[in-house]
Amino acid sequence: MSKKEGDILINFIKSRGIAVEDFAEKAGYRGRQGLYYQLKKGDTLSHEFKLKAAEVLGVDVEEIFGQNLDKVKKVDEEKEVLKKLVQAQESLLKHQNEFITAQMIRLEAFEETILAKVAEIQAEVVPRYKGRNLDAILDEAEQDVRDKTQEIRKDLGLSASS
């Protein structure tokens, strides 16, 4: 839209020979400033405001703005629906993030418990671990990893420092 609807309305009021102050008073504003705020706050005016302005001026909305009133109302309704959809989406994303965070915290807490339980079971079931404490089993596992790493490095011809 090349021209703001507020400017279109002001020009229409003036073209009818009506003082802006008189229009403001008839439209329910205490003075010109309140009306100007309403007219200048955006590119478009609300459907309800357009109806009120047309009523005060005794004309159809189409005569002032050159628009089909039903089309304008439909666009306003679509904008409102889109606004509500965006708000709903933002709310869902917020709750989704909170849910994921809670799940991660829960999994982290259970991971430690599960690993400890697995180590306990290994200490009871695996013959070479029977009767040994958990620290000794973990130390042996760490040493096994170091030994295997050195073996792979040796097979690949890599030095121990690289």
Image (spheres, rainbow, N blue to C red):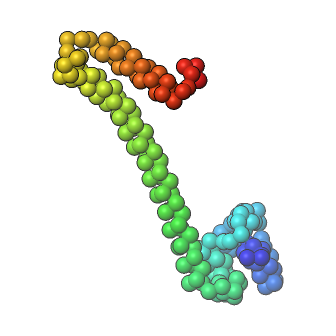
Along the viewing direction, whichever of 20 and 87 lies nearer the viewer:
87
Q: In the image, residue 19 lies at what x, y percent?
A: 80, 76
Q: Is residue 38 visible?
A: yes
Q: Residue at x 69, y 86 (%)?
A: 66
Along the viewing direction, whichever of 57 and 117 lies nearer the viewer:
117
Seen in the picture, residue 35 relative to 55 is either above or below; the reply is above
Q: Quadrant of the C terminus?
A: top right
Q: Quadrant of the N terminus?
A: bottom right
Q: In the image, residue 43 lies at what x, y percent?
A: 71, 69
Q: Residue at x 41, y 24 (%)?
A: 148
Q: Is residue 52 visible?
A: no
Q: In the image, residue 128 lies at what x, y percent?
A: 23, 17
Place residue 160 in its image quadrant.
top right
Q: Residue at x 50, y 26 (%)?
A: 153
Along the viewing direction, whichever of 50 and 153 lies nearer the viewer:
153
Q: In the image, residue 133 lies at what x, y percent?
A: 26, 11
For residue 73, side relative to residue 99 (left or right): right
